[in-house]
Image: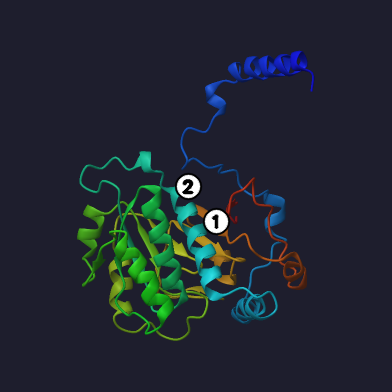
Amino acid sequence: MHKQTFKLLVNLVKRTASRVPRSCINQNPLTFSTKAYPDWRINNMKFLNQVEAQNIDIELFNEYKFSIEQLMELAGLSVACAVAKSFPLDSLLNATRKNRIFVCCGPGNNGGDGLVAARHLRHFGYDPVVYYPKRPNKDLFRILTEQCARQGIPFLDEMPSSAYISENYNFVVDAIFGFSFRGDVRAPFDMILEVLKSISVPIASVDVPSGWNVENGNAEGINPDVLISLTAPKLCAAKFRGERHYLGGRFVPKALEDKYHLDLPLFPDQECVVLLPKIK
């Protein structure tokens, strides 16, 4: 390139850059678009029953060669991003609660998603505290637990009271039961759900609100303010009436989406979650 031409291009770039308003630059890494998925398509999107959700997971493992570690990491990151959208750090102004959040994890993969989410939320600037009463005897969950502990995330030995949670935490992440849950809620989770039903701070549930039937909805479960569906919403999500419903997990192969007629939304830009409109 001719030397004089090169200088002209450099000067042009400098002049253009100087005219870019600072308001166009995202100053807050936790500020995301919250534009909802268009209403007219929500009725076309597939809501999965329990068998369909299980079959999709099996195909992701067997046909598309995802590992459980990969899917759990993607799911947990989606949960953390949806939580950060719903409860931005700059909105947590309570002097007692500070940035503290309570993450309640169950014994299965939903609990693993919660551990991953807690780790990412720690990186986002929140102070998660985890209650994980029944830990599976598997390397994956031991590793996830140790990762959290090594990042300074405390684990509680006992479930706090509803009054203590309401006073000391800004919100709760419910990662107790997922779409594989069947039957009655047993100890200690029956007591845990009773506590969560009586707290005064918001709850964000991972994939399925704990205590809900995955297909029929709320039996005697909690009523979250935020629901983060993963892969695709489950049938019970049609009965969710909270403030925000996100879809997370931007990893479904197009061929698998077409096979199950999922009609998933287009995720905005590079985000891993999308806000869905309320079902009327």
Q: Which mark is residue 85?
A: 2
Question: Helix, strand or loop at disc 1?
Answer: strand
Q: Position of residue 137 (x, y in %)?
A: 37, 85
Task: Tell me if residue 240 can be seen.
Answer: no
Q: Is the residue marked by circle 1 packed among few (<14), some (14-19), or many (20+) residues within 10 Å?
A: many
Render colour scheme = rainbow
Please report contact status of discs 2 and 1: CB closer than 8 Å, yes or no: yes
Q: Residue furthest right?
A: 2
Indicate the quadrant containing the N terminus: top left, top right, bottom left or bottom right.
Answer: top right
x then y, percent, for residue 195: 28, 68
Dividing the picture into quadrants, the one containing residue 204 is bottom left
- Identity of the residue drawn at 59% across and 16% down: 18
The number of discs equals: 2
Q: Is residue 131 above or below residue 182?
A: above
Question: Which of the numbered marks, if any, corresponds to residue 218?
Answer: none
Query: Which corner quadrant holds the C terminus?
Result: bottom right
29 vs 241, nearest the viewer: 29
Compare marks 2 and 1 and give the one earlier in the sequence: 2
Amino acid marked by disc 1 = Tyr
Q: Which residue is mark 1?
A: 246
Q: Residue at x 51, y 72 (%)?
A: 69
Viewer-closest of 3 and 274: 3
Residue 185 position by quadrant: bottom left
Q: Marks 2 and 1, Cα distance to the nearest angstrom?
A: 10 Å
Q: Is residue 161 left or right of residue 182?
A: left
Q: Residue at x 39, y 73 (%)?
A: 143
Q: Nearer the viewer, residue 79 or 144?
A: 144
Q: Is residue 275 visible?
A: yes
